[in-house]
Image (tube, rainbow, N blue to C red):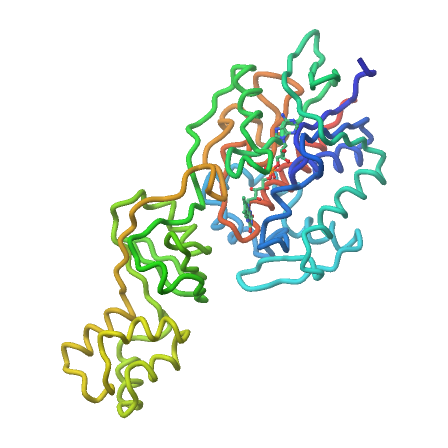
């Protein structure tokens, strides 16, 4: 067995990499262990492979973007927040850009830029990294944590668990951190799919691949205006992912294709284009394939629509009904809701209240956020804070 480390971090996602950086920054002898060949496999796939590294909103935006226990993070954000993430990357040579809805990406549009920067920083600060090393057990004996991997053993005074949730297990997040927590008798809340694509009985083939900016999905009191994507199984994109927290399957939701246009404005538009066919008029407002689809029951000029037909067209544009038949499974959802129960954790240090020296950060905790950079923000910020508590 090697000499004990001050700090070992299990899991090289955003939380683990940032924990390693902060731990090294505070002078700790640090080891980051990752079972994949490369660090940041899940991070690499975010933002369509461009890495949606954070969101540039204010604290209220962060709280709105983290519906799953965001308030637990007030203390974390007072120590390290999204603006510190932006400053960190810029100070370390990564130019960033802000896109719609405050989403922050590297200017290169490549996840590798972000992952390389984090890795370089760990190296520069003298941290050690071991990839292709899966930790299979953890014990605490006489104040030291003992970790076993296939052919190696390690020990440390402080252990940070950043193994992620249980979504997309092919990226490495298979729930090992929950097992560690259970071993130490910490409670795990129920694990559920969050930010989940929606299955619908909609004519998928016709609309598959169409993406719409800022449309509104409505279900009961829930109104979500964001981008939406029609897929071969139903609906994806931020609007669908956000609505997934409020539906299970069996509900009918309404889609407003033109939320910025009132019914009166649309009636005026119909009047101004009365000589055009419904199809040609709608093409001015919507993507061509969608216009074709919505106009198929009205193959005539707008001026020939009966009042009933006009009303039905308006309903289709402003409140198109879609039957939700289910959600993707936890494994196919973007985020895991549930995790290490927050009552077990000190919000200032992210240390277990029961087991001194044992810290958790990132998606392994019972915190879930919307896509758009909020999960990654939570992961990087909790990672920094967990790493910053140093052994004297
Ligand atoms: C397709 C997709 C798109 C997403 N898009 C966005 C987005 O746009 N915005 C956003 O905010 N969030 C997004 N997310 C969510 C975000 O990527 C995660 O919330 C974030 O990566 C969690 O970080 P983490 O460090 O806690 O865990 P992870 O990134 O899951 O990292 C955990 C690491 O621990 C390692 N590990 C696990 N067990 C062991 C073990 N026993 N030994 C050694 N290593 C181990 C794993 O291999 C893994 O690398 C997306 C997720 C997916 C799947």
Residue that sits furthest to the front in the current view: 205
Work out whether residue 129 or residue 53 is closer to the camera in this orientation and state it.
129
Q: Quadrant of the C terminus?
A: top right
Residue at left offset 51%, top offset 50%? 371
- Residue 284 x %, y %: 39, 82
Taking 348 as reference, is 4 above or below it? above
Image quarter of residue 22 = top right
Q: Which residue occupies the foreground of this view, 188 or 342?
A: 188
Q: Is residue 283 left or right of residue 146?
A: left
Q: Quadrant of the N terminus?
A: top right
Residue under the point 57% across and 51% down: 373
Q: Is residue 234 above or below residue 69?
A: below
Residue 107: x and y, percent?
70, 62
Residue 34 higher or lower than 304, as above or below: above
Q: Residue furthest bottom?
A: 275
Using the image as rendered, state which of residue 158 and residue 239 is in the foreground: 239
């Amino acid at each position: 067995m090697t000499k004990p480390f001050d700090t070992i971090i299990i899991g090289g996602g955003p939380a683990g990499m940032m924990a390693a950086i902060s731990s090294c920054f505070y002078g700790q002898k640090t080891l980051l262990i990752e079972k994949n060949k490369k660090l940041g496999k899940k991070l690499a796939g975010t933002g369509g492979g461009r890495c949606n590294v954070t969101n540039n909103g204010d604290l209220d935006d962060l709280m709105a973007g983290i519906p799953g226990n965001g308030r637990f993070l007030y203390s974390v954000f007072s120590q390290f927040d999204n603006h510190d993430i932006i400053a960190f990357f810029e100070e370390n040579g990564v130019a960033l850009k802000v896109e719609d809805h405050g989403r922050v990406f590297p200017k290169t549009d490549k996840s590798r830029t972000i992952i390389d920067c984090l890795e370089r920083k760990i190296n520069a600060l003298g941290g050690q990294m071991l990839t292709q090393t899966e930790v299979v057990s953890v014990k605490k004996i006489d104040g030291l944590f003992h970790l076993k991997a296939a052919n190696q053993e390690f020990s440390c005074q402080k252990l940070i668990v950043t193994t992620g949730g249980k979504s997309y297990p092919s990226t490495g997040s298979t729930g090992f951190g929950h097992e560690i927590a259970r071993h130490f008798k910490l409670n795990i809340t129920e694990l559920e799919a969050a930010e989940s694509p929606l299955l619908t009985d909609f004519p998928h083939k016709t609309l598959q691949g169409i993406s719409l900016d800022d449309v509104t999905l409505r279900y009961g009191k829930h109104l979500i205006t964001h981008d939406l994507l029609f897929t071969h199984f139903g609906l994806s994109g931020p609007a669908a992912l956000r609505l997934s927290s409020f539906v299970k399957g069996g509900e009918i939701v309404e889609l407003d294709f033109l939320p910025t246009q009132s019914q009166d404005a649309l009636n005026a538009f119909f009047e101004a284009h009365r000589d055009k066919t419904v199809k040609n008029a709608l093409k001015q407002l919507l993507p061509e394939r969608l216009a074709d689809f919505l106009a198929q029951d009205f193959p005539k000029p707008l001026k020939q629509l009966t009042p009933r037909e006009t009303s039905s067209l308006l309903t289709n544009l402003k409140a198109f009904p879609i039957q939700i038949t289910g959600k993707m499974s936890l494994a196919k959802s973007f985020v895991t809701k549930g995790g290490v129960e927050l009552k077990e954790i000190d919000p200032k240090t992210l240390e277990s209240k029961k087991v001194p020296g044992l810290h958790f950060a990132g998606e392994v905790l019972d915190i879930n956020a919307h896509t758009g950079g909020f999960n990654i923000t939570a992961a990087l910020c909790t990672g920094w804070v967990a790493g910053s508590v140093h052994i004297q």
